[in-house]
Amino acid sequence: MKKSILLAFSMLISVGVSAADWVDNKKIEALFSEAEVTGTFVLYDVAEDKLTGFNKSRAETRFFPASTFKIPNTLIGLAVGAVDNVDEILPYGGAPQPFPSWEKDMSLRDAIKISNVPVYKELARRITLEKMSSNLRALNYGNNDIGTTVDNFWLVGPLEISAVEQTAFLAKLAQKTLPFPVRIQETTQGIVLLEKTETGSLYGKTGWADAPEPDIGWWVGWVVKDGKVYSFALNIDVLGEADGPKRIPLGKASLKVLGVL
């Protein structure tokens, strides 16, 4: 009964944002043109229940979430007790990694900053397939499909999520209204905090999906400014090494165009 209530609640979250008004922004379109990338950017203004961005069709298209999934992975890991806290050290496993910085046992707090894949795979294995699946359905995260392998579904599928769905999920996390304890949501917020000023705070996480041509680069998060919440999601086609580093600058430029950053 409890699971059914949580699922119904989370479905309402997604429907609400999907039904929000969409406003095309030509300045953001120009930013993507200048950056010479194909992609989308969407901002969800929670107070106004309005979506603003570029390339609505793509914003509603699902892709592998890649390392942006470290946000729900953290929430679920804490909720089921797979780790006691975000400072508990997890093993990376000892196998050679693409980056030397990943070849180290570390906490979730440190691992999320450098997007340490093996540490978060270990977290997923501790969560277990059954608990991961049921908790993800409660969040109504994308297509809710994790398949039969617990430690790579966010990297190679079958899990997929759209930019609009990312903003729905993140808006609820920003407001601490997900169906998880508030302290767990606050802890997860804390490890994705990027910048804090007198007027607001910026939270975010990148992702890079090694998808069937082309790769997909993500930057998702939210801004709290003057007490208001604005969640956002950007994704682009990564056709070469020069494209990946464009994600955050392009996202920040889009936020500035909209007067949020």
Image (cartoon, rainbow, N blue to C red):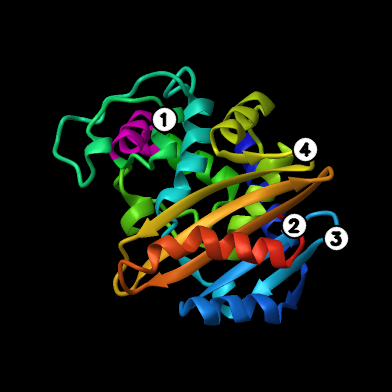
Tell me how far mark 1 sits from mark 3, CA to CA.
35 Å
Tell me how far mark 3 sits from mark 2, CA to CA.
14 Å
Q: Which residue is mark 1?
A: 110
Q: Nearer the viewer, mark 4 or mark 1?
A: 4
Magenta highlight: main SS:
helix
**Residue 170 placement (x, y as % from top left):** 63, 49
**Residue 26 placement (x, y as % from top left):** 69, 82
Q: Which residue is mark 3?
A: 48
Mark 1 or mark 3: whose residue is earlier in sequence = 3
> Observer-nearest residue: 192 or 80?
192
| Cβ atoms at labels 4 and 1 below 8 Å apart | no
Q: Which residue is mark 4?
A: 198
Instruction: Tell me, yes or no, whether the highlighted magenta stretch contains residue 249.
Output: no
Q: Residue at x 38, y 52 (%)?
A: 154
**Residue 133 falls left or right of residue 187:** left
Q: Which residue is mark 2?
A: 260
- Quarter location, residue 187: top right
**Residue 52 falls left or right of residue 111:** right
Q: Amino acid at mark 1?
A: Asp
In the picture, the disc for residue 15 is: none
For the record, the magenta segment spans 118-130
Mark 4 or mark 1: whose residue is earlier in sequence = 1
**Residue 18 placement (x, y as % from top left):** 70, 66
Q: Quadrant of the C terminus?
A: bottom right
Task: Count neighbours of disc 2 (C-alpha within 10 A) and say few if under 14, some if 14 to 19, many if 20 or more.
Answer: many
Q: Amino acid at mark 2?
A: Val
Mark 3 or mark 2: whose residue is earlier in sequence = 3
